[in-house]
Every structure is written in structure tokens, then in C-alpha cells.
Image: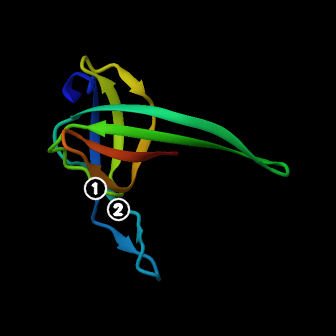
Amino acid sequence: MISGRLTMRAVVERRTATDKDAWGAPIGGVFTPVGEPVACFIWSKQSRELVDGAKIALIEDVRGLFALGADLQAGDEIASVTDRKGTVLIAGRLKVEGPPQFKHNHIEAALQRIG
């Protein structure tokens, strides 16, 4: 059962009150929590370095499993990931990339670390 694997808690935030740039893309705005922390399990599937001349970039494939019923949308940000006791497990913010995929007993999402 997937619920036993969802040992982490994520604070999901959504952008509100956005302005738009000249092309209609959102800029600025404020992220506010969507609700209570959501049961989840987040992991880094793979990371590698991409070298282009003198430039080096780290590419990381971060994934997340979330409880069914979690209010999760593309563009949402995860402000913190903790264990059930509130200890921070993943520092920094994560962004939900693309639409979450609904499976038969959970939701899956690709995530991106943001600065």
C-alpha cells in the first residue's frame, strides 16, 4: 500500500496576485499555502553534471509521490519537506513541473529545485 511509503510532509504553495510581463507570462506575485501539509515521498532519481566548455551545470531528476486528493497543480511550489515530527528533510524550494499524474492510489509529479 502506498500510504506506508508517504513518510514525508510537504507544504504546497500556489502563486496568487500575479502581474504579467509583455508576453503574458506571470511575474512576481506571492505564494500562499494551499492547505495543510500533504503526505508525500520525495527523492532524487538521478543527478549528473553537464559540461559545456568552461560551464558546468548539475542536472537532477527529482520526483514526488503524493497522497490522492492532494491539491497539486503545475507551477505550485513546495516550500518545505519534513518528516512527521517536523524535522526538515529537504532544504530549499521545489517547483512542480508540468501537470501531476494521477495514478490509481497516488499522485506523481516531476519536481525542480529552485533558488
**Residue 17 in picture, x, y percent from top left:** 27, 65
Q: Residue at x 38, y 33 (%)?
A: 42
- Whether pointer 1 and pointer 2 mark residues with C-beta atoms closer than 8 Å, the reply is no
Residue found at the very far right of the displayed protein: 53
Indicate whether 83 appears above or below 20.
above
Residue found at the very far bottom of the displayed protein: 22
10 Å neighbourhood of mark 2: few (<14), some, or many (≥20)?
A: few
Q: Residue at x 35, y 46 (%)?
A: 109
Q: Say which mark, if any, is on residue 73.
A: 1
Indicate whether 5 appears above or below 70.
above
**Residue 53 in picture, x, y percent from top left:** 85, 52
Compare residues 22 and 69 and report the one nearer the observer: 69
Q: Three-letter amino acid code at disc 2?
A: Gly
Q: Say which mark, if any, is on residue 29.
A: 2
Assign a secondary structure to mark 1: loop
- Label 1 to label 2: alpha-carbon separation: 17 Å
Q: Residue at x 35, y 34 (%)?
A: 80
